[in-house]
Image: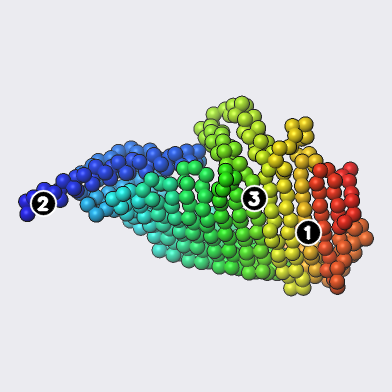
Amino acid sequence: MVLSIVILFTLTWYCSLQTEQHFTAQITAINQLSPELIKVELINYQRKLFTSDAETAVSSMGTKEVRLNHQLRHFVWGVKMITTLAPDSALAKEIAPNIPLDQLQLTTNFSPLGASKSRFILPQLKLQDDRGNLEVTGFSAGWDLNGDQTMGKFVCFLDSLKLQRANQSELNLTNLSISARITDLPDIPLGNGEIQLEKLKLVRHGKPAVEFQNIQYRGETDLSLGLFSSTAELDFAQLLLAKETLHDGRLKLTLSGIDAELFRSIQQIAGQLQQQALDQQSVPLELQLQLLGLYTELLNSGVTLTLEELSLNTDKGEVNGKGTLALPSGSTAEISLFSPENITVNFQLEIDLGAFVTGYRLLNNLQSTGGQYQNRAVLAEQAEQIAGGLVQKGIFTRQDGDKFRVDFFWAEGQGELNGEPFQLE
């Protein structure tokens, strides 16, 4: 029994030592991940047999630092860390009158190999001052990292958010969820993520200004054969804007052909420039020119932007489009980077007359002041006349019924619009 107790205490002591090493290693990893965005400083660490106490200071994007207290309970089977605001810190004193500090706790569990799972739960939050009030319910967030901090998962949930301003504007969010899976954290972040939002509503002067319903965003980044690519998809069920209704909207974009090494170099130099700007230092012209040169080299390496799908429905029509914009690799130095000879474009758009009328009314309503919209019938008649004029000028081609089409192609300084050649003047 004595031997068992000695072994248990020895392992516990060893665990306390390992905990301190993992804790400092994680701070180092965070600082290396994005030093221009976030910086963590270890102020104090007091190691004991069963528990340890630490204090850190976190600063981000030039903002005032936030001091945190960490209580670590280390045992043979793992470590549990409770993170809270330092009671005597400026931020704690500012929010304590509105939020009990004991509700602001981040719980992190570490495995013996250093992998971690962090969770933050805030059931309800209410803030109010002369400028307005904020009410948040059902907020929770969590992230899991592997032992060497190179892979992770992130989740966030929010039941509702209501922000009211003194100028009678109001923002409402309902049922927000965010999830992401990331690899190669210290390098180019790769992985995929998704955002879902049941409703986003913006009210001005007591009247709805914008209302989105059932928004979904999906993004994915990949690295293959030294080339970096990214895909973004956005869908929404309905959009109410300026007394017009749009529904079943979808946009899918792909960016491909990005040289990974050039992208890393751009990240590094951009980070240096941003850090110097945040520290209020003069930004060397040499770094700016170097960054511009890398951007030029990157675009000349053969970047392609693909509009894989554009679709939108209105009450009386729909819009569909697709296309590509490419910068060929190996562009000659004599040709300017943004010269028309250096760009290839292929684009197709189909639009119903009803959708064109809705879009014309929407643009006019957005440009109006004080919510004084013009007569809908008058705007519809103007839109039909404009569509007819575009057909006469050859910009639109009329299809079956009240449908229009645009075919645009450009390569090597030569273009075609709906099959007819044209030149840029």
Q: CA distance from mark 1 to mark 3?
A: 18 Å
Local crowd at mark 1 within 10 Å, few (<14), some, or many (≥20)? Answer: some
Q: Is residue 168 visible?
A: no
Residue visible at 44% across and 61% down? 139
Name the residue beneath numbered marker 2. 5
Q: Earlier in the sequence, mark 2 or mark 1?
A: 2
Height in image: 372 above or below 10?
below
- Front residue of 306 and 50: 306
Question: In the orientation shown, which residue stands out farthest toward the right?
Answer: 392
Local crowd at mark 2 within 10 Å, few (<14), some, or many (≥20)? Answer: few
- Front residue of 184 and 286: 184
Q: CA distance from mark 2 to mark 1?
A: 76 Å
Residue visible at 89% across and 51% down? 421
Residue visible at 74% across and 64% down? 320
Amino acid type shown at disc 3: Leu
Q: Earlier in the sequence, mark 1 or mark 3?
A: 3
Question: In the orientation shown, which residue stands out farthest toward the front?
Answer: 225
Answer with left or right where residue 244 lies relative to residue 97.
right
Q: Which mark is residue 348?
A: 1
Quadrant of the image containing the N terminus? bottom left
Answer with left or right where residue 136 lies relative to residue 283.
left
Amino acid type shown at disc 2: Ile
- Point out residue 271 in the picture as x, y percentages from the top left corner: 54, 37
Residue visible at 24% across and 42% down? 17
Name the residue beneath numbered marker 3. 255
Q: Mark 2 falls on what kind of element?
A: helix
